[in-house]
Image: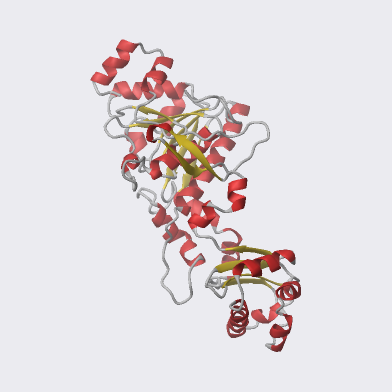
Amino acid sequence: MNEPHGPLRGVKVVSCSTAQAGTVPYMLMADLGADVIKIEAPAGGDSSRVASVLPGMPSTFFETNNRGVKSVTLNLKLPEARAILHKLIATADIFGQNFRPGAAEKNGFGWDDLRKINPKLVYISISGYGPNGPHADLPGTDSMAQALGGIAQAYATPGQPLKTGVVSVADETCAILAFGGALAALTHARTTGVGQKVDCSLLGGQIRLMGWTLTTAMWRNRDPVTGQARVAGTREKPAMSASFNDRDGKPFVFQLSRDQWKEALAALGFTEAMERAGFSHLGAAMESDEVREALLAKLGELFATGTREDWVARLRAGDIVSAPINTLLEAANDPDVIANGYVAEIDYPKYGKRLKVHGTPWQFSETPAKIGIAPELGQHNNEVLAGLGYSEAEIADLKARKVI
């Protein structure tokens, strides 16, 4: 059994969800103490259970997205299984599903079905495109949302084809928004006694992730300049975020707020060289693309004379925001990541290993999160069904008839 912990202790969640966006919201809730029951098909369960890249080890995909939850198997095509689901829903606070649009309704766990059983229920529905629009009925994936949502351009190199990234940013953003939406609706339900359906989508989350940059593009009615640097503001009050390589090709970034140009050049020892090149004021970069590129090229030439460690240290000493650009493995070993528990180590007794995993992005002073591991398929059938009043004989019969 999961030990009670965290700020969501006492919250009951039932999830008929797969993939990433559909499971991460409830994994986060489990981290924070919610009692989360994941419904899986008896034959094989969540397909991502076998998405392993390490022989003899659990699926990194399934483990990352389903840790700390309970697994109950139900063949929802059978009325007996749907009856069990409905019993679980009767006392649940939150229900989540990310089936293809229309499938939940077809299988007896649509919003209109479940609200009759539990009027206080918060019902989370995750789709690819959103509940409205010409493609609302189509299935969606992370790469589809990245393609439609603008992030491909946000990280593009001018002159190079746009492409989606290897990290599932659309899935994760949607999941985090679903997590927040669920808790907002739960607050309303506990205050008023009225539940509601909350629709989230991969595309909607990706659009939100574009933030103020999208607003600027819409107001100007033109796409942003992408690539090595982001120059914003006005000629008089410019700001810049830019990346460069050191003499060994190691990348780093620094970001200047308005009026920090002279301080940055002084910290780096670049003042005289940049003044001779005609770049005593960062606002020059706002004059034209040619001037902007020339300024960046001169900085690149100067940065190629030293090491990343030295440049970052100098900038930070001058109170300028700067950091090395980490690879994923470098990020996993970054001292601030480790110190704050954003990456942690936990034991996997079945495999006799202690492995690095995602930690928690929150630190609660009174109700700390607790990291679990993903369940075996149907691991909690007996526990959960017994809690609903089923006897051992009845549970055995349900298993024999492949209801569970």
Left or right: 25 in relation to 236: left
Residue 381 shows up from this direction: yes
> To which quarter of the image does residue 209 belong?
bottom right
Image height of 389 relative to 265, above or below? above
Front residue (pair 280, 140): 280
> To which quarter of the image does residue 5 belong?
top right
Front residue (pair 235, 52): 52
Front residue (pair 315, 32): 315
Q: Position of residue 387 (x, y in %)?
A: 43, 16
The residue at the far left in this view is 401
Q: Position of residue 297 (x, y in %)?
A: 58, 81
The residue at the far front in this view is 352
Front residue (pair 55, 220): 55
Image height of 235 relative to 69, above or below? below
Q: Position of residue 182 (x, y in %)?
A: 54, 37
Q: Position of residue 2 (x, y in %)?
A: 49, 25
Left or right: 47 in relation to 184: left
> To which quarter of the image does residue 253 belong?
bottom right
Left or right: 284 in relation to 45: right
| Residue ID at (62%, 45%) | 340
| Residue ID at (63%, 80%) | 302
| Residue ID at (43%, 23%) | 88
